Amino acid sequence: MPVIDAITAFHEDMVRWRHDLHAHPETAFEERRTADMVATRLKSFGLEVDRGLAGTGVVGTLHHGHGPAIALRADMDALPMTEANSFAHRSTQPGRMHACGHDGHTAMLLGAARYLAATRHFQGTVHFVFQPAEEGEGGGKQMVEDGLFRRFPAHAVYGMHNWPGLEVGRFAVRPGPMMAAFDIFEITITGKGSHGAMPHQGIDPIVCGAAIVSALQAVVSRFTDPLHPAVVSVTRFHAGEAWNAIPDRAVLAGTARALGNEVRDATEALVRRIAAATAEAYGADAEVRYEQRYPATVNHAAEVERAARAAALVVGAEHVDRDPVPSMGAEDFAYMLLERPGAYIWIGNGATDGGRHLHSPHYDFNDAILPIGASYWAKLAESVLAENRAE
Ligand code: NI
């Protein structure tokens, strides 16, 4: 497979960077050691380095000749969970783990920066964007709000995530939605506490809550077009303390996902209506807190074409899936795609045996794909910025 030789030559360096990051995971907006490491490396490769966007964000910039500008983005944060692996580079921090491979994403983008700084076979500008807090906290949104594209104007923006279950040496990318919109809700049901033996003297928020959980199953199964994907999951149900006392309150919480904004808004309206009406039927009261978090990650067709062609230069066109099934997971690269045209691609991380799923305590990024990912970034920059020069 035509991975770039000059990148393969420093594969071991990328593995070392990745293992160092893996052993020292940092969670949302606290990626200080990670940002120091990234900034130091970028400077050593000869890039201009800016820091401070979204707190711990780092942007490295390479100019060469005259041409348009693109942004390549990696995420740097770890998850608040404890690693179950025992290999030498396992997390040194209890309750912190690179269980989503952002250590590998950072190492691959650093590898591309090193190669492109040394070779400069492009005309224009490449911004290497290292963002904090992808996991639930919206570091990508924060970088945009802090002026990412104002300070670093780019005509297009590209993202990449490793994908367990997709073979090593494969990529997947499609126009339109790649990842879902992600929302959260909390429903507080207020009834009236009473003796467990005399339920008629109170209003039972647990029975009411159970009815709401059941009724919410109809949001997707009965109210949503079967051809428009959505998920509503109640993931928490807290109520009561004693076995013989009916409590005053019950609190439900969960998450909703959708691939399109219309379905997303309709889902919110239905959750609110079903919670309120069901509570009323039981004589209880339901207060719904509903927050729309990340929007859907929606790829732009022209940039998908460029991304797919760059991936094909590395692994061959037959190993680039142009029509993968979108994921109901979410990704805050979505915010960057609302600002600039772009494409988000999956790179195969290989088999999931041994629990190598994203967010599993047994997960580890696959070091074998570091040169594949770095070569993709390099080919993408070289082809997009050469292609534009010819126009
Ligand atoms: Ni991730």
Image (spheres, rainbow, N blue to C red):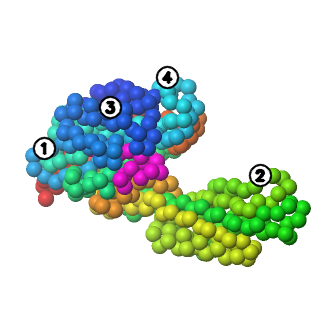
Residue bearing mark 3 = 37
Looking at the picture, which amino acid does disc 1 mark?
His
Instruction: Report the magenta residues as a range.
Output: 128-142
**Does the rendering let one see residue 257?**
no
Query: Is residue 178 placed above or below 123 in the rendered structure?
Result: below
The percent coordinates of residue 219 (x first, y second) are 62, 70
The percent coordinates of residue 224 (x first, y second) are 57, 73
Instruction: Name the outermost residue toward the left.
Output: 65
Residue bearing mark 1 = 64
Mark 3 crowdedness (10 Å alpha carbons): few <14, some 14-19, many ≥20: some
Chain-order first, disc 4 or disc 3:
3
Looking at the picture, which amino acid does disc 3 mark?
Met
Asked if labels 3 and 1 touch by Cβ distance under 8 angstroms, the answer is: no
Distance between the alpha carbons at the discs numbered 4 and 1: 40 Å
Q: For the residues carrying marks 4 and 3, which lies nearer the camera in this image? A: 3
Queried on whether the Cβ of the residue with tag 4 lies below 8 angstroms from ligand 1, the answer reads no
Distance between the alpha carbons at the discs numbered 1 and 2: 66 Å
Regarding mark 4 in the picture, which secondary structure is present there? Answer: loop
Distance between the alpha carbons at the discs numbered 1 and 3: 24 Å
Residue bearing mark 4 = 88
Chain-order first, disc 4 or disc 2:
4
Regarding mark 3 in the picture, which secondary structure is present there? Answer: helix
Q: Which quadrant is the C terminus positioned in?
A: bottom left
Q: Which mark is residue 324?
A: none
Residue bearing mark 2 = 241
Most foreground residue, 182 or 13: 182
Query: Is residue 311 placed above or below 39 in the rendered structure?
Result: below
Q: For the residues carrying marks 1 and 2, which lies nearer the camera in this image? A: 2
Distance between the alpha carbons at the discs numbered 4 and 2: 44 Å
Asked if labels 1 and 4 touch by Cβ distance under 8 angstroms, the answer is: no
Distance between the alpha carbons at the discs numbered 4 and 3: 20 Å
Q: For the residues carrying marks 1 and 3, which lies nearer the camera in this image? A: 3
